[in-house]
Amino acid sequence: MAKNLIEDGHTMDFFNESDSAIKSGDAVAVGRMVGVAHDDIPVGEAGVLHTTGVFSMAKGNAAIGQGEKVFLVDGVVTTQVADPDGINALAGYAWASAEADDGELPVRLGV
């Protein structure tokens, strides 16, 4: 095994510094990447985020095609690359297509 391996990268420790509790399954932006909470993470406590895998995520009201790159904006995934401050957090790729009126999208986390 490589001597410089830190970990497999499937999960990440995360400290909730926000003003609200994070629920298990919530998508969480960490810098420009997105993880999904394994368990509830109360304010001021640490928890674990998944950084790989396919998760069902809330989506906006636009159709998204399979394989499209998606970003997290205000708790929903969208194909909108840029926010007013520059670039939205990359959630990953659409695992399947979703119609405009579908409320959720399966997303493969990461790159």
Image (tube, rainbow, N blue to C red):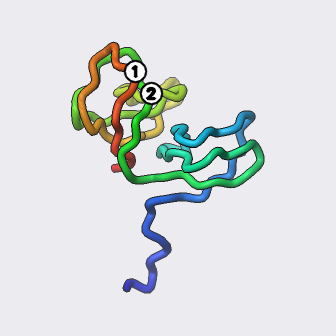
Circle number at residue 103: 1
Q: Amino acid at mark 2?
A: Ala
* 3 vs 53, nearest the viewer: 53
Q: Picture coordinates of residue 58 (x, y %)?
A: 44, 27
**Tag 2 or tag 1, which sits nearer the N-term?**
2
Would you place residue 109 above or below residue 58 in this image? below
Dot 1 falls on a residue whose secondary structure is loop
Q: Is residue 56 above or below residue 9?
A: above
Q: For the residue labelled by badge 2, is the local secondary structure a helix, a strand or a loop?
A: strand
Indicate left or right for 110 with 35 as reference: left
User: What is the C-alpha distance between the residues marked 1 and 2?
Assistant: 6 Å
* Whole-percent x, y for residue 72 in the image: 46, 33
Please state the horizontal and vertical placement of residue 108, each as a whole percent of the image.
34, 44
Q: Residue at x 37, y 85 (%)?
A: 1
Instruction: Give residue 90's quadrant in the image.
Output: top left
Residue name at image x 49 percent, y 74 percent: 6
> Is the residue under label 2 in contact with that under label 1 (CB below 8 Å)?
yes
Q: Position of residue 30 (x, y in %)?
A: 55, 46
The residue under label 2 is 58
| Horizontal relation, residue 71 to residue 46: left or right | left
Residue beneath the point at 50% across and 45% down: 36
- Using residue 85 as the reference point, say whether residue 15 is left or right of it: right
Q: Quadrant of residue 93?
A: top left
Q: Disc 1 marks which amino acid?
A: Gly
Is 5 drawn above or below residue 42 in the view shown?
below
